[in-house]
Amino acid sequence: MGEQKPKKNQKTSSSSSDQETDKISKLPEHIRGRILCYLPIQDAIRTTILSKEWRNVFKSLFHLSFDQTYFENKKLNSEDFKIFVDQTLKLRDDSNVQQFNLSSRVDEFTAPHIHEWISYAVNHNVQELDLHIFAGTFEKLPGCLFTSPNLKVLRLNGLGFRLPTLVKFSLLKTINLRRVMFYGDEPLNALISNCPVIENITIASCTWDSQAFINISFPSLKSLILSIVCRTHAIKIAAANLRYIRYNGFPPDISSTTLTSLYDARFRFSRLYPCSTNTTNLSVQAYNVSRILNGLHNVGKLWLEHLYIEYLSRVKDFFASPLTSCASLTDLKLDMYSTDNHVSVIKFLLKSCPNLQTLSICVQEKSTQTLEMLSMEGYFPVQELSTDECILKHLMTVEISSYEGSESELDLMTFLRMNANVLKDINIISYSEQFKEDVATRKPKDY
């Protein structure tokens, strides 16, 4: 008898599990459809095959995500992937597609079909489309994509295209372009100028044949990530409601209303490429940086990297008058060269940050080659700051990384100790410790 009890318990457990499954199967169809959306599409298909109650749900599945790397990890080839996508779309009914994700390589099997797969999504009123080409060359998007009346989110990665004559994104709120090659004259302006309600723009590591200037002017824009690695003459940004910016490149011309609206800002100039030229002269670029700092009245978080500090050290009469007070700034990150000029600039910046709470400084290795490429070989004489009292009344945490203990770094440390009277925590990481940490945790930048 004792041997029979586990079987009875096992049967009871199995029956209970079946009842739970039946409860899920009896949920309204739109809720079951949302459940399927959280599964990889391969698992969603298996679910519908095993259960009659789920088959109709799959036919109207509104979230379609096809990732060829999944197939490659399973030792399946491009032809298998192509057949899977075709059959999946063939089994669907005519219901709308809310989200369509396609990550594919371009080869003899997929190349003839990517165009029609995108067209399928557009013809089914897709609202969010994500296309990632991770291998091969794809350079012709269907024209219907550029007039999609329902599209709200567009992400393109690793492809090239020429804009059609007609571009109209009436409802597009988010556009994310990474490693995109544009063909034709002024393609970037032509594209984004036809997005009247855009709120989020990401343009990173894109290239183009001809782009004299970039003009981003949208009252609706809230978030901007812009990483320029290609030739352009000038960059102008005017967005009265912009709150978040991540900018990498030559100093842009940003309107005063845009600067006033910013809360979270980062400006960097990470590296130069052979095509990374800018015809704007050095004095204008330096002026743009100075103007940015004087206009950030409401910023709460700011990250300024070392070449922007370098630009400020080149502004004639930069120390002649105080910077506009940035009373809302509580979190400041700075990258610097270990030079007297950079320390002078940083001291001057800190005088305009009365409510600063957290300060992070990273000492960078000076690159003479970079300065020469930017025509920054010469230096202005170091300017002595006034000895007026500068109390950082709210600064509680300081971190300095890649610290080597040079005279200029010691000068900065002395300044902080004398002027931050509530400082609680100072964390100093030496250059050797930082190098080991960087090697162990090296990650790509966010743009």
Image (spheres, grey):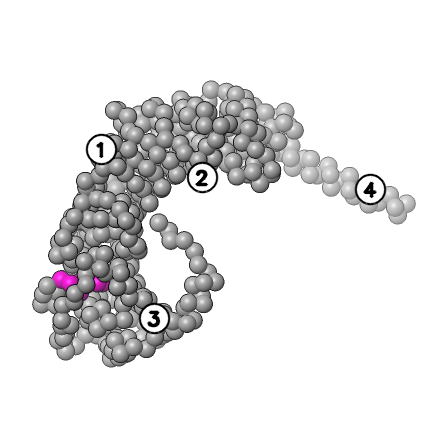
Mark toward the start of the polypeptide (2 vs 4): 4
Residue for badge 2: 134
Disc 1/disc 2 C-alpha distance (Å): 26 Å
47 vs 334: above or below: above
**Residue 36 x %, y %:** 54, 34
Residue for badge 4: 7
Task: Tell me if 143 is positioned left or right of 93 in this view.
Answer: left
Disc 3/disc 1 C-alpha distance (Å): 46 Å
**Circle nearer the viewer, 2 or 4:** 2
Q: Amino acid at mark 4?
A: Lys
The magenta segment is 309-315
- Residue visible at 63% across and 24% down in the picture: 52
Image quarter in which the N terminus is found: top right
Query: Is residue 122 visible in the rendered structure shown here?
Result: yes
Mark toward the start of the polypeptide (4 vs 1): 4
Task: Tell me if 310 is positioned left or right of 132 in this view.
Answer: left
**Circle nearer the viewer, 3 or 1:** 1
Graded by Cα atoms within 10 Å as few (under 14), some (14 to 19) or many (20 or more), the crowding at tag 3 reads: many
Mark toward the start of the polypeptide (1 vs 2): 2
Does dot 1 land on a helix, a strand or a loop?
Answer: strand
- Residue visible at 46% across and 22% down in the picture: 95
Q: Is the residue under label 1 in contact with that under label 4 (CB below 8 Å)? A: no
134 vs 323: above or below: above
Q: Is the residue under label 4 in contact with that under label 3 (CB below 8 Å)? A: no
**Camera-side residue of 362 and 218:** 362
Q: Amino acid at mark 3?
A: Ile
Q: Amino acid at mark 1?
A: Asp
Mark toward the start of the polypeptide (3 vs 1): 1
Residue for badge 3: 400
- Residue visible at 16% across and 77% down in the picture: 389
Disc 4/disc 1 C-alpha distance (Å): 75 Å
